């Protein structure tokens, strides 16, 4: 490949955006654990307290991770959208150019 050639998998980027949003959703769902578990369901108060401590610590750092995941997902989707539009615009321009008899042959 020559230096400067751009190779891009739009399907791969589109999948990546979806996967990042899925990860974010699954992370959001972990916040529901403290509402689903009750005392005694983990076998001991110490286990329940440890789970609560983990959940609260997780919430502290999760917002930053959520923002990062969403931003990267938006960027990936934006690239897919813009490249798809560019491809369609170029295809349309080429067809119009060829219709006008300026195909270069």
Image (spheres, grey):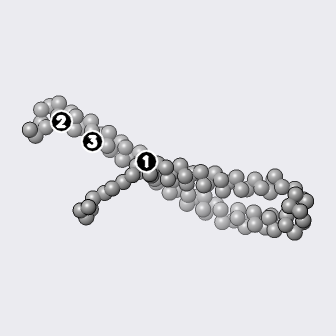
CA separation in Å, label 1 and label 3: 19 Å
For mark 1, give the secondary structure: helix
Q: Nearer the viewer, mark 2 or mark 1?
A: 1
Estimate how packed mark 1 is, as few (under 14), some (14 to 19) or many (20 or more) residues with alpha carbons within 10 Å. few
Label 2 vs 3, first from the N-terminus = 3
- Look at the picture and state if 101 lies above or below 79: above
- Circles 1, 3 touching at the beta carbon (< 8 Å): no
Which quadrant of the rendered structure holds the C terminus?
A: top left
Q: Quadrant of residue 57?
A: bottom right
Report the disc number at residue 54: none
The residue lying at 36 percent from left, 47 percent from top is: 83
Alpha carbon separation for disc pair 2 and 1: 29 Å
Q: Which mark is residue 11?
A: 1
Q: Is residue 2 left or right of residue 80?
A: left
Q: Could you say which disc has been placed on residue 90 in the image?
A: 3
The x, y position of residue 37, in whole percent, is: 83, 55
Q: Work out which residue is located at the far left of the displayed protein and give it.
A: 105
Task: Tell which circle, 2 or 1, labels the residue nearer the N-terminal end.
Answer: 1
Which residue is depicted at the point 41% across and 45% down? 81
SS for dot 3: helix
Q: Is residue 78 visible?
A: no
**SS for dot 2:** helix
Q: Residue at x 80, y 64 (%)?
A: 52
- Where is residue 90 shown, x and y percent of the image? 27, 41
Residue 67 sits above or below residue 54 on the image: above
Left or right of 103? Residue 43 is: right
For disc 2, the marked residue is: 97
In contact (CB < 8 Å): disc 2 and disc 1: no
């Amino acid at each position: 490949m020559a230096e400067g050639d751009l190779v891009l998998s739009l399907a791969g980027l589109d999948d990546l955006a979806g996967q990042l949003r899925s990860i974010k959703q699954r992370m959001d769902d972990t916040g529901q654990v403290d509402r689903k578990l009750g005392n005694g369901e983990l076998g001991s108060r110490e286990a329940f307290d440890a789970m609560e401590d983990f959940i609260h610590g997780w919430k502290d750092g999760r917002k930053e991770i959520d923002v990062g995941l969403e931003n990267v997902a938006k960027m990936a989707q934006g690239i897919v959208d813009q490249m798809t539009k560019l491809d369609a615009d170029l295809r349309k321009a080429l067809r119009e150019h060829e219709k006008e008899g300026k195909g270069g042959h």
